[in-house]
Image (spheres, rainbow, N blue to C red):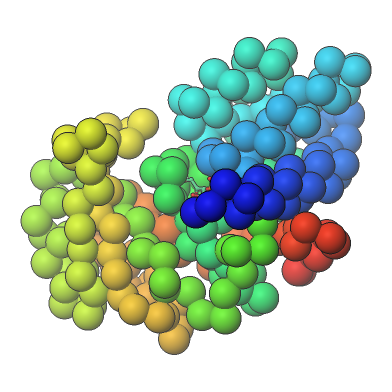
Amino acid sequence: MATTDKNQQDAEKLAAARAAVKFVKDGDVVGLGTGSTTTFAIIELGKRVKDGLQIKAAASSIRTEELAKSLGIEILDLGRLSEIDISIDGADEFTASLDLIKGGGGALFREKIIASLSKNALIITDASKKVKKLGAFTVPVEVIPLAYQYVFDQINKLGGSGVLRTKDEQAFITDNGNLIIDADFGLIDDPAKLANNLNQINGILAHGLFINLTSKVIMSDGTDIIIFE
Ligand code: 5RP
């Protein structure tokens, strides 16, 4: 991507982040996603906390937790929460009906728990993430290592083709100690059906299809903030 495109995209991410952070109120428990867009939101939240906003947060990854703590945001144990007031996260793709693909950053499992606990699950994006149909971005699938080949074969049986995610020529390992298969299903006609099919496969901890887990997508196109709900 050319530098100007990246600058434009970053400006959109920041604008969406600023719009989302305005929804956070004193006393809220806030779920924090992972990724470059969410990083803008965490930094903006950190500024509000410095100015006196009283919140506690739950983090979807180790890197989000470290960033939030460094900005003075108190982090709670996600595993002890029954409810989250509001969450802010990014997405790799979204449709106007609020179906998402997430997990490009590998934090999909904890992000899904946060979205599931959230009374108000906000997704923030730049304009490049809006699609008519999901699937140009591959669907991340977090797999327990000993089920790797089984899950890989089941993805094939569903008509997909998987690739083991790597980092620095090694298998990418999630914060939960698992592997990720990036699964290409082509453009997805029925995301809910595919999500259901993936839900049936033993050994999958989570997949990146987020269906009925989003309250609003807040998108910036560089000029306007557009809210899908
Ligand atoms: C991480 C995610 C991210 O929200 C998604 O990958 C978008 O990332 P970015 O904001 O960097 O484009 O799902 O697991």
Report which quarter residue 85 is drawn in. top right
44 and 198: which is toward the camera: 44
Is 83 on the left or on the right of 197, as rendered? right
The spot of residue 220 in percent (x, y) is 76, 58
Residue occupying the far bottom of the picture: 189
Q: Is residue 20 visible?
A: no
Q: Is residue 165 left or right of residue 175?
A: left
Residue drawn at x 17%, y 37% is: 169
Viewer-proximal residue among 228 and 203: 228
Percent coordinates x, y for residue 83 in the rendering: 67, 40
The percent position of residue 35, horizontal first and vertical second, equals 53, 40
**Residue 45 vertical position relative to residue 205 in the rendered view, above or below:** above
Query: Quarter-wise, where is residue 126 in the image?
Result: bottom right
Relative to residue 23, is residue 57 depicted above or below?
above
Left or right: residue 109 compared with residue 46: left
Residue 7 as seen in the image, left or right of residue 149: right
- Residue, x 41% and y 80% (percent of image)? 188
Total marks shown come to 0
Residue 211, image quadrant: bottom right
**Horizontal and vertical percent for residue 57?**
67, 28
- Which residue shows up at 55% across the image and 23% down it? 65
Q: Quadrant of the C terminus?
A: bottom right
Residue 21 visible in the snapshot? yes
**Residue at (61% x, 69% y) in the render:** 130
Would you place residue 109 above or below residue 227 in this image? above
